[in-house]
Amino acid sequence: MKDIPVEKNLVDLFFRRTLYGFAVLAFLLLGGLFVFLIDLGLPAFKEVGLGNLMSLEWNPPLKSFGILPFIYGTLVSSLLALVFSTPISVAAALFLTEIAPRRIGAVFGFLVEMLAAIPSVVYGLWGLFVVIPWLRTSVEPFLRKSLGFIPLFSGPIYGVGMLAAGLILAIMITPTITAICKEVFGAVPRPLKEGVLALGSTRSEMLWIGVVSSSRSGILGGMILGLSRALGETMAVTMVIGNTAEISMSLFAPHQTMASAVASEVAEATGVHLSALGVVGLVLLLISGCLFLFLRWSLRKGGYSR
Amino acid sequence: MMTPSPALLEVKGLKAYVESTEILHGIDLGVSRQEVVAFIGPSGCGKSTFLRCLNRLHEETPGGRAEGRVSLEGQDIYASGTDPVRIRRRIGMVFQKPNPFPSMSIFENVASGLRLNRIAKGVELEARVEAALREAALWNEVKDKLDASGMSLSGGQQQRLCIARALAVKPPVLLMDEPTSALDPVSTAKIEELVIQLKKETTILMVTHNMQQAARISDRTAFFLYGDLVEYGPTTKVFTTPSDRRTEEYITGRFG
Ligand SMILES: Nc1ncnc2c1ncn2[C@@H]1O[C@H](COP(=O)(O)OP(=O)(O)OP(=O)(O)O)[C@@H](O)[C@H]1O
Ligand SMILES: [Mg+2]
């Protein structure tokens, strides 16, 4: 074995050390974040107890710190967003990759990506002044009249509320899901599509069998990525959800999410109240973390060979 | 000579293009029922393109286009207003690389054509799937795991699965593009045997680079060269006393 020239060796060593350092730093940051949130939330556990924290009532002046309404608000608004956004995203991605002429596909693809660059406060403003009046005067009255027997569509109408939050979130996560779907649809091999066509399928049958259903795990990955964006979204939701810590079956009713609760109350909170908000942050982090792990797992499991 | 031809498939002046490149320069060829026709010729001379023109799949190639007449049972499949979907329902195709549908089970793969064309359902569907798998000599290997993914099979099994999928709808014509090129000798032998069996009901057009295979299983052989059909006749004649010098050179390996 010949010696490697010393200077090359040193550079190599320096690089590896540096990269190692960054990896450790990332790990420390994550750990530090956890420690910080646990430290912040611990007093709430000690003073009011788990029973109080896991209750349905959030009323800081009365020392009630139940965070379930926030968890409910976050999960339901995010799922609602997913329900609205997924079909639109899948259809948009199909259109962009399979149907639109190349030029038009490129232009529309660009526009969809632009949606992701709009600051969320702008979505909030638009939601407040355009979407909410429309919901209050047209959509929600119509839904209540035709489907009011379902608890989801009953109760008083305010405009602000769960439905508004779900809609705004749906628009915000559509670029994410569309981008992932475009990617997976574009990767469907031509021979697979031709195989479906050769069996005598129509174009739409081919798109369904050859493209959409053979991309199921990829679509799921896009949905989870969109969901994790929706869970953490704060500003736009704060502006349209109504900021009311309640659990109501009605989609018309105002609610509150975890992110939005922390953002809107942290400035005035002190003592146990502040600590309880720390617990909210911790739960949000745990939920997002679990979702991320599930995403990695599902992508690995879904790595089917074609 | 204007005797009424018994041809199942009649090709007249078929030209194929990709963008502005002419790939096939006017092919004339007829195929009768219950025949196996082998297509041989060097790589890139247009054999795959020719087969893909017969079920109108060539037009799915970006920039792909065909001209000329191809009549199937007397009907011109390129006549304006003809829906390629209807044509493809009567002409099955097996590709060079097995392409089972990744989201479907073994059973669903074979059933897919029957479901798409609403040919059968329920008990009849199950019976047709089993029959197709038996025909493709795959039934014994998969009968206990019909719900497993088609992708879980070996390459040779996947190819027989694709053959079963094509056979399930009982097409009068089956196009096979080098179906055994990626397979081991045992799987190849099974598929060759299958082709000979199938001949009773189905007309088979098969591209192959294997001269022995062409000689073993085909009734007629077509030799393609640079987008032209150089020679077409009974296999024994093409292989023993070809009328074109280039055919002889190719078959004896002295080509190029
Ligand atoms: N998608 C395409 N774009 C451009 N040219 C193509 C395309 N597909 C085929 N061709 C051209 O058409 C010609 C014939 O191709 P084809 O695949 O029909 O040949 P082949 O006889 O089947 O060859 P092989 O034996 O290698 O399969 C080739 O010269 C090839 O370059
Ligand atoms: Mg070929």
Image (cartoon, coloured by chain):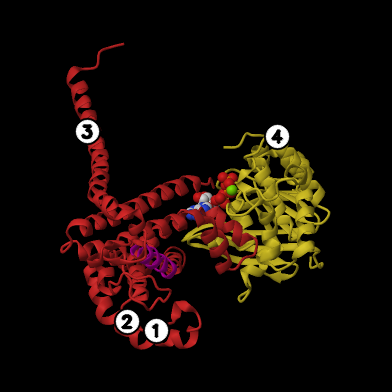
Q: Residue B82, how many percent across, how many down?
A: 63, 73
- Reply above or below: A66 against A35: below
Mark 1 or mark 3: which is in front? Answer: 1
In the figure, what tint was chain A given?
Answer: red
Q: What distance separates the C-alpha of mark 2 from that of mark 4? A: 71 Å
Residues A296 and A145: in front is A145
Magenta-drawn segment: A70-84
Tell whether B200 sits left or right of A120: right
Chain for numbered disc 3: A
Mark 4 or mark 3: which is in front? Answer: 3
Q: Is residue A132 magenta?
A: no
N-terminal-most mark, 1 or 3: 3
Quarter of the figure with residue A63 = bottom left
In the figure, what tint was chain B given?
Answer: yellow
Q: What distance separates the C-alpha of mark 4 from that of mark 1? A: 68 Å
Element type where label 4 sits in the image: helix
Report if the CB atoms under discs 2 and 1 are less than 8 Å apart: yes
The disc label shown at residue B185, or none: 4
- Label 1, on which residue? A140
Report if the CB atoms under discs 2 and 4 are less than 8 Å apart: no
Chain for numbered disc 4: B
- Label 2, on which residue? A159
Q: Amino acid at mark 1?
A: Glu
Quarter of the figure with residue A3 = top left
